[in-house]
Image: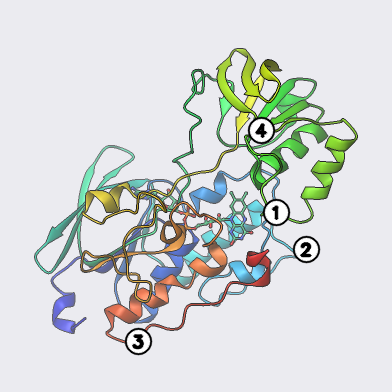
Amino acid sequence: MGAADSGMHDVDLLIVGAGPCGLAAAISAQRAGLRARVLDAGAIASTITQYPYYVKFFSTAEKLALGGMPFLVADDKPTRREGLAYYRAVVRHFGLDVHQHERVTHLERSERGWMVHSQTIEGERQRTTARAVCVATGYFGSPNLLGVPGESLPHVSHVYREGHGAYDQDVVVVGGGNSAAEATLDLWRAGARVTLVHFGPTFDKKIKPWVLPDVENRMKEGAIAARWESRVSSIEPGTVTIRGPEGEERLAARFVYVMTGFAPNTALLADAGVPIDPVTGIPQHDPTTLETCEPGLFIAGVVVAGYDANKIFIENGRFHGDQIVARLLGQTAPAAPRLSAELDS
Ligand SMILES: Cc1cc2nc3c(=O)[nH]c(=O)nc-3n(C[C@H](O)[C@H](O)[C@H](O)COP(=O)(O)OP(=O)(O)OC[C@H]3O[C@@H](n4cnc5c(N)ncnc54)[C@H](O)[C@@H]3O)c2cc1C
């Protein structure tokens, strides 16, 4: 990017999404002398605000750190609250230009760059011109719906926060991944009567190794019920109707947690003309530079992995900004960081 280009735009790099990977990209850009701005529809690291209240990260603090700023915690893994405090401190420490509660609504190609349309929480429409745009919109906010009647009833939730309100209540958890397993255990520990419903014959393979024996042992001893190879056909107030190997069954359920994961937020990219692979959900891009087929439009963070949210995490997505900035400066991008053993497990 030539110096002459810089003055033509409000910013050099406009980043959509103030998640860990978007913030990391802003630090990389700022360090390279580029003017970066981040717009987020919610607050800084709003995805982490959606985690269960008392969850701990599976990564050590060191692997969640951005821009080399130390992330020190007393225990082995940070809590959700410590993570939120750290990412707020990152924004302050690096003096990042972050506009919170301002949703990007449309990316428009303009002469020698992009026009970014956004809307603040007060309804004010904004326009920002940028030489390049990085979409780091993550995947929260687009839950994988079951598509069954009753899914939008008020006692049905696609996120899990805590079990207290389910004490002494019948609860159904739908799903077989890590979030379903952890919610099931937490609800049982809070005194709920839990039934897990999953279309597969067992839990998914990628469950945290310390969670799996815990939940499986509770099931073996009959403390938690499970219905494998079963699909939800409808949800009613007080019950969930499922169809499994034994035929149709109605399970009592005062609360229903649908823990079936999320799809990446790629609507802005599709709208800007970037093809999204219908099978993998991956936006078409060059894996070395992370530039899409639209010049100057980049992707970063978990959206890079499409539907496979187990491939990109904070641990590795925090390096995407370096690849993008290298491209903007006309340099060779650094080698993609290897996944840690923890991520492979
Ligand atoms: C319970 C749980 C525990 C986890 N623990 C770990 C862990 O230990 N280690 C790890 O590496 N990963 C962990 N993850 C995964 C991690 O949270 C994600 O990989 C990470 O948040 C992805 O970062 P990101 O910056 O790509 O996207 P996100 O963090 O999802 O951020 C995307 C941001 O984009 C914003 N946005 C979306 N659309 C728009 C728009 N149109 N305009 C403006 N803003 C928009 C959103 O508001 C959001 O703030 C965990 C996930 C969960 C659910």
Marks 3 and 1: in contact by CB < 8 Å?
no
Label 4, label 1: how far apart the Cα atoms are: 30 Å
Callouts 2 and 1 close, C-beta under 8 Å: yes
CB within 8 Å, label 3 to label 2: no
User: Eyeballing the image, is 115 above or below 143?
Assistant: below
Q: How far apart are marks 3 and 4 (CA)?
A: 49 Å
Residue at the disc numbered 3 = 332
Q: Which of marks 3 and 2 is nearer the N terminus?
A: 2
Q: Are marks 4 and 1 in contact (CB under 8 Å)?
A: no
Q: Which of marks 2 and 4 is nearer the N terminus?
A: 2
Where is residue 270? Give x, y as percent: 27, 50
Relative vertical location of residue 217 with respect to residue 319 in this rendering, above or below:
above
Residue type highlighted by circle 3:
Thr
Residue located beneath label 2 in the image: 75
* Chain-order first, disc 3 or disc 4: 4
Query: Could you tell me if residue 117 is visible in this image?
Result: no
Residue at left 51%, top 49%? 47
Q: Nearer the viewer, mark 1 or mark 3?
A: 3
Sequence-wise, the earlier of marks 4 and 1 is 1
Q: Residue at x 34, y 40 (%)?
A: 121
Mark 1 or mark 3: name the one nearer the start of the chain: 1
- The residue tagged 4 is 229
In the picture, the disc for residue 56 is 1
In the picture, the disc for residue 255 is none
Query: 64 or 210, which is in the foreground?
Result: 210
